[in-house]
Image (spheres, rainbow, N blue to C red):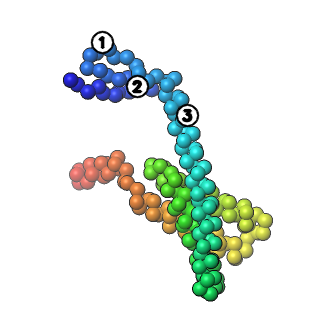
């Protein structure tokens, strides 16, 4: 007994059965659209949750970092700026974990840009103008976020198409 194969003809999927006289479309365009909309809405909700998680984890990281150094009676500019690096990393890292693995590269970049835009709009350049302190804050947040982005880029699986292309070109040489 042969196993049915799924093949696509244009946009409609057709289930191939072992008996050619019974081949009929099982999944039409009208059935694919609601599924595509559901998948899009699910992905949209995951991005919204990722942004919320990034926001909460950033604030929690900042206040925990400062609380720990306050309890051990250490203060100074280094501690305060270290908080910005850790906040940038934690926000992007924990927010990106809410996304599907295939969207983590793009999502981490999006979360970094959204976080920088939020920081800029809430605390930054628009109202107060550019100063050395604000520039340092943005650079340190960016450095932390880029660390998280690098983590996800290094951890993600390489593109198999690129690997096969590289292997084919290497075998020609």
Q: Nearer the viewer, residue 130 or 4?
A: 4
Residue 93 appears anywhere in the view: yes
Residue 23, horizontal then vertical, whole percent: 33, 17
When asked about the image quadrant of residue 73, the answer is bottom right
Q: Is residue 133 left or right of residue 158?
A: right
The residue at which mark 2 appears reads as 13
The quadrant of the rendering that contains the C terminus is: bottom left
Crowd tier of the residue under label 1, counting other residues whose Cα lies within 10 Å: few below 14, some 14–19, many 20 or above: few
Q: What residue is drawn where x is 59% and y is 85%?
A: 72
The residue at which mark 1 appears reads as 21
Q: What residue is drawn where x is 37% and y is 54%?
A: 157
Q: What residue is drawn where x is 70% and y is 76%?
A: 132
Residue lying at the far top of the rendered structure:
21
Q: Nearer the viewer, residue 60 or 20?
A: 60
Crowd tier of the residue under label 3, counting other residues whose Cα lies within 10 Å: few below 14, some 14–19, many 20 or above: few
Residue 166, horizontal then vertical, whole percent: 31, 52
Residue 47, horizontal then vertical, whole percent: 57, 49
Residue 77 sits above or below residue 159 on the image: below
Q: Is residue 134 left or right of residue 113?
A: right
Residue 116 sits above or below residue 26 on the image: below
Residue 140 appears anywhere in the view: no
Residue 6, horizontal then vertical, whole percent: 34, 28
Residue 124 sits above or below residue 6 on the image: below
Q: Give the label on residue 58, or none.
A: none
Q: Which element carries disc 1, helix, strand or loop? A: helix
The residue at which mark 3 appears reads as 37
Crowd tier of the residue under label 2, counting other residues whose Cα lies within 10 Å: few below 14, some 14–19, many 20 or above: some
């Amino acid at each position: 007994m042969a196993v049915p194969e799924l093949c696509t003809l244009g946009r409609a999927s057709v289930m191939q059965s072992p008996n050619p006289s019974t081949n009929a479309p099982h999944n039409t365009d009208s059935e694919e659209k609601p599924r595509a909309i559901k998948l899009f809405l699910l992905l949209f909700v995951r991005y919204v949750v990722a942004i919320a998680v990034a926001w909460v984890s950033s604030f929690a990281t900042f206040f925990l970092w400062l609380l720990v150094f306050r309890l051990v009676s250490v203060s100074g500019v280094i501690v305060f700026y270290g908080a910005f690096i850790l906040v940038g990393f934690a926000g992007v890292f924990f927010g990106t974990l809410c996304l599907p693995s295939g969207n983590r590269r793009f999502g981490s970049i999006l979360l970094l840009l959204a976080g920088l835009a939020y920081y800029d709009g809430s605390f930054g350049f628009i109202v107060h103008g550019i100063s050395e302190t604000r520039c340092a804050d943005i650079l340190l947040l960016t450095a932390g976020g880029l660390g998280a982005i690098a983590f996800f880029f290094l951890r993600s699986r390489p593109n198999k198409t690129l690997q096969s292309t590289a292997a084919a070109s290497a075998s020609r040489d």
